[in-house]
Image: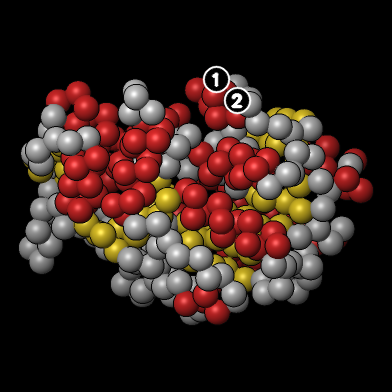
């Protein structure tokens, strides 16, 4: 039986659907159950049971014989949240408890790390380098970094583990994320309503407005990588999960305008002060490590990914 934490969320629900498509229905799902905005993410999907995250560790201890593999994707992901105690509880200590059980009872685990651990990117985005020097820009990033550091210090581990450093993921089932949803979803909503799009202006002289760049990756590709590690439990470690190609916000928004058959009309506005100090101007995953362990699928291009997302999932006619 496979366990997925964060199963009602964005990546988790897409993983559940993919597992269903591959014939896996004996799934134990874990999440918070209070937020009804995520209810639709699991519509028509098959699973054995859904458990509240607060009782899952206890449940796992009592049902170890049922569990073959764990995808630990549940986390507090709000990059604007400043309360470190929340991240210590949900992202760090909870993950430690789960990892220790997986170690003691030899259960393979894939967990969600984050590209936020790379901070401002001055040290690059290479997942083969020493991680102790990394300096995240916010408490969320630090919670992921601190867990990665703790895992790397363990002499006893599960038979296989992988920490996936997700870059900028977009795709279906992210509507509940609000401000933290992808720029593609925000652009779709704004352009559909106003025929215009607002982007943050650059506050650096060496970067033009809208030319801030991110490594955008479709959630389909993220799920493909999760499935790859389920089927190939050989090389434990931290892995980047991006497309390997940085693209500008101008590129992204232009693709949205094109998918909606609208003329490009972009306005640049100041970056909000509460995030300006921690704003990343460039991210690009080095994907050589993942390729070196046998992952060979091509990544969806930004243009194709935006078109598919909008036309297949967001447009009223889809």
Foreground residue among 174 and 165: 174
Whole-percent x, y for residue 40 in the image: 54, 24
Q: Nearer the viewer, mark 1 or mark 2?
A: 2
Checking the image for residue 43, the label placed there is 2
Tell me: residue 20, above or below residue 213.
Answer: above
Whole-percent x, y for residue 100 in the image: 77, 57
For residue 63, side relative to residue 141 (left or right): right
- State the residue lying farthest toward the front: 317
| Badge 2: residue crowd in 10 Å (few <14, some 14–19, many ≥20) | few
Q: Of the two numbered discs 1 and 2 on the same chain, state the one appearing first in sequence.
A: 1
Foreground residue among 58 and 227: 227
Tell me: residue 44, above or below residue 27.
Answer: above
For the point 55% across and 29% down, the residue is 41
For the point 65% across and 63% down, the residue is 229
Q: CA distance from mark 1 to mark 2?
A: 12 Å
Tell me: residue 270, above or below residue 156.
Answer: above
Whole-percent x, y for residue 35 in the image: 55, 23
| Badge 1: residue crowd in 10 Å (few <14, some 14–19, many ≥20) | few
């Amino acid at each position: 039986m496979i366990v997925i934490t964060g199963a009602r969320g964005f990546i988790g629900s897409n993983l559940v659907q993919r597992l269903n498509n591959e014939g896996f229905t004996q799934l134990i799902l874990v999440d918070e159950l209070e937020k009804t905005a995520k209810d639709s993410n699991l519509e028509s999907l098959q699973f054995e049971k859904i458990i509240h995250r607060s009782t899952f560790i206890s449940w796992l201890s009592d049902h170890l014989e049922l569990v073959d593999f764990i995808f630990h994707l549940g986390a507090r992901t709000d990059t604007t949240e400043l309360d470190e105690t929340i991240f210590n509880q949900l992202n760090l200590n909870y993950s430690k408890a789960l990892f220790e059980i997986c170690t003691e009872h030899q259960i393979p685990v894939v967990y969600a790390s984050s590209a936020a651990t790379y901070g401002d990117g001055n040290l690059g985005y290479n997942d083969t380098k020493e991680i102790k020097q990394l300096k995240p820009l916010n408490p969320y990033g630090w919670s992921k970094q601190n867990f990665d550091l703790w895992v790397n210090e363990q002499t006893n581990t599960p038979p296989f583990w992988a920490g996936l450093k997700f870059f900028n993921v977009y795709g279906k089932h992210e509507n509940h994320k609000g401000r933290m949803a992808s720029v593609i979803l925000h652009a779709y909503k704004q352009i559909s309503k106003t025929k215009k799009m607002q982007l943050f202006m650059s506050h650096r002289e060496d970067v033009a407005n809208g030319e801030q760049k991110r490594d955008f990756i479709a959630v389909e590709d993220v799920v493909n990588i999760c499935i790859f590690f389920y089927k190939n439990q050989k090389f434990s470690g931290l892995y980047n999960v991006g497309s390997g190609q940085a693209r500008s916000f101008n590129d992204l928004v232009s693709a949205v305008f094109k998918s909606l058959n609208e003329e490009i009309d972009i306005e640049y506005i100041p970056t909000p002060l509460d995030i300006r100090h921690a704003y990343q101007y460039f991210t690009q995953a080095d994907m050589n490590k993942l390729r070196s362990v046998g992952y060979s699928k091509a990544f969806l291009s930004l243009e194709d990914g935006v078109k598919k997302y909008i036309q297949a999932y967001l447009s009223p006619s889809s």
